Image: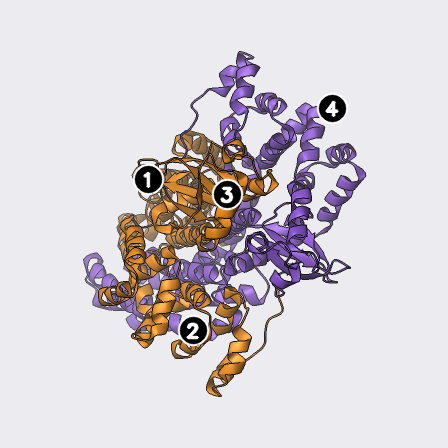
Chain colours: A purple, B orange
Amino acid sequence: MKVKIQIDIRKLIERNDLKTLKLLLQDQEPGTIFEMIEELEASEKIVVFRLLPKDLAAQVFSELEPDEQLEIIRLLKSDPVLREIVKNMEPDDRAELLDELPAPLVTMLLEMLTPEEREETLQILNYPENSAGRVMSPRFIYLEENMTADEALRKIRKFGKKAETIYTLYVVDNSRKLLGFVDLEDIIYAEPHVLIKEIANYNPVFVYTTDDQEEVAQIMRRYDLLVIPVIDKTGTLVGVITIDDVVDIIDEEATEDIQKMAGLNVTYTSYFHTPVLTFFGKRIPWLAILLLLESLSSFVVAHFQNLISMVPILAAFMTLMVGAAGNTGSQISALVIRGMALGEIKTKDFSKVLIRELFQGILLGVALGIILLMRGLLITSDLSVNIAATIALFVVILYANILGVILPFMGKILKIDPAVMAGPVITTVVDVTGMLIYFSIARAIIGI
Amino acid sequence: MKVKIQIDIRKLIERNDLKTLKLLLQDQEPGTIFEMIEELEASEKIVVFRLLPKDLAAQVFSELEPDEQLEIIRLLKSDPVLREIVKNMEPDDRAELLDELPAPLVTMLLEMLTPEEREETLQILNYPENSAGRVMSPRFIYLEENMTADEALRKIRKFGKKAETIYTLYVVDNSRKLLGFVDLEDIIYAEPHVLIKEIANYNPVFVYTTDDQEEVAQIMRRYDLLVIPVIDKTGTLVGVITIDDVVDIIDEEATEDIQKMAGLNVTYTSYFHTPVLTFFGKRIPWLAILLLLESLSSFVVAHFQNLISMVPILAAFMTLMVGAAGNTGSQISALVIRGMALGEIKTKDFSKVLIRELFQGILLGVALGIILLMRGLLITSDLSVNIAATIALFVVILYANILGVILPFMGKILKIDPAVMAGPVITTVVDVTGMLIYFSIARAIIGI
């Protein structure tokens, strides 16, 4: 990686040495500036924003976490710097910002924009959350079929700087309906007089404004695209989504899945930028529901009270029994959920997965059963208890492995995100039902 | 999304209607062809590969799963089509393929290449797994400082088709040391006689060949780069990594983390392309270790046998106690692990996270304690048991919340991937130690 600039920006700000600071900030990439100011207070960040060229300030500002953006807006309020930053933001970033601000601030910021910019921003905000319309940029270059390569290049030179990308250009008809695309490199390789229609590809991959961003990411990944065109219901080209936004989406979706799989409601802000109370609100609902569900296990135990009091050593196997089953269920559900997220496992594959995991469950059950039998003999020499525990473990493991397949598929069919059917949910279900299986088998074998 | 072509390729192959098939395959994107043939047998896929233009065949072949690539290579063996496919693959894809094949096949394939291609491939294979050197492409365009924009454009027109990308060009000195870069658009916007050094950016972000691919992905994401240059220790430019490869890396890393967090050893192939026995090998080590660890809980239970036999209702709270604690630990460890993977939480943040989660643990403990107290009164009217269970739950939840912070940090410090310190490991540790806490508190309060 690049050699880091080891300079204490905070000191420069304290010393009010703005000249040196300006010199340092000059010609840096937005990412570098972001790293340089990451640890500064909002009030210190403002000093930096004042010194940055407007478009750079806007880019760095877009990268900040929502809570910091809010604080900086509040601090700058009537400052002309704020107007410049907001005006220079990409339309999609601006829409994202407005989406998270309280209403009075939204009104204030909207008033800073020209009517055209305002409309552009509000249009993006009209699309449903997480849809392609929300992440697209309305700034792209379109070409007509009968332009020559040379005319196209001239158009690109003229309008390119305002566009999100010039590396893929879209071919449209009179009413802006999407016909195809040309890569900039093909225009460069072509003779100047060649017509765009001769080098265009008329089989463009596209998405609709209402498509989910996760689907957009999957398609762009599958087709190795740098840009994808977004069309509305009538087929009109309304925007483009570039790969750098998709990279963020992919990370965001993975984070979402990981959080759901850990039994949390999703948090979109990063760890340190999320208040403790917000996390509490995200965590407690699942914990409470699972605790109540888990408390059903007390009825199971109560039901077998007699058996336990007669063969108390049975209690010694309780936790390890449901623990092992919970782990088995966590494993397979994670595999199935991730496979679904990547599009490798589809709803129609249910029986195929079920058969595989039936077989896998038998293998795991036998292997773990053997381990438990050897281990169990160290806990108690009572053979019937050991045999009961081994058989019960086999059944519980097989059961957990199947449950870890069924629950995510059930989620998918019921249109609940399969990711919630992971670790904690499965562990809890297995705790309650697994104990029932264990004690039933034990009673049958020991014969009480 | 694009309208899908609803044609039964299999029928065309069976009918031997290769003319129609060739027509259909013509001008399709590699991604489309991949989808079209996804469900075909290897022997049927071969028919398609024979009909495809060589470079397209190579691209589609690169997208296949390793087990299918192996099967197709075995089926094609001495067929000239195989030679064409392998020769037309991107060097990094070819290296990846060779890395997974048995030695005799590697030798066979290497013999198909020209000495130059062979060297290129072997060089990539020399870099450590998951390093930047492994995923980079050695095919890039470099410019000299004193070229004019026009000369640069001519060089791009001449060599561009062989390069991985022409959208970013690298400026090097006589000994190919990296000096800076120029975006293609800046060359296009520039007057023809302008010198490259006037429009180049001399502050390039780069990575070393030995850097980890995850780090490369993080840097490219942070700087919104489409391409990143890769240099060796001497500063010489040796390759470029493009964003489409990084998208795959990001997905791969998320999959890796999710699998580790579910207590599995990592599988790099997709679900249906991984044999059941391979999964068994990935799953059983963790399950076995955790089972043995979990079996320590039997000693804990045995130790408190007396207490249980005197107050048997205590057993009814066992599972829900460790269940709730396990869920709490899973949540926080997932948050910390993901934060670490995204670079939001660093080793130095340990005490900051610990203090936050101490506070969070108290909140969660109190909330869950209240729920349990109300619920517990339905299970037993014995107030001292209920108070003992409530206090124990509070302590166990707080403990699990702290453990879910400590274990990932411990992993990071000990250079074990923090992702393994998630759900299953934490649940198991909490099962064993949590029970000890529960019964100790119960004994102290009930006073036996």
Residue position marked by numbered label 3 in the rendering:
B152
Which labelled disc corresponds to residue B232? 1
Kindly identify which chain the residue marked by label 2 belongs to: B
Of the image marks 1 and 3, the number of the one nearer the N terminus: 3
Q: Residues within 10 Å of mark 4 (few under 14, many from 20)?
A: few
Of the image marks 2 and 1, the number of the one nearer the N terminus: 2
Residue B281: horizontal and vertical position, in percent?
A: 29, 62
Q: Is residue B85 left or right of residue B6?
A: left
Spatial separation of the CA atoms under disc 4 and disc 2: 64 Å
Q: Is residue A440 visible?
A: no
Report the residue at 52% width, 73% height from top.
B25
Residue position marked by numbered label 2 in the rendering:
B49
- Which is more toward the observer, B228 or A89? B228
Q: Residues within 10 Å of mark 3 (few under 14, many from 20)?
A: many
Report the residue at 57% width, 21% height from top.
A44
1 vs 4, front mark: 1
Q: Is residue A234 left or right of residue B100?
A: right
Q: Locate the N terminus of chain B by quadrant.
A: bottom right
Q: Residues within 10 Å of mark 1 (few under 14, many from 20)?
A: some
Tell me the quarter of the picture where residue A146 sits. bottom right
**Are dots 4 and 3 in contact, CB under 8 Å?**
no
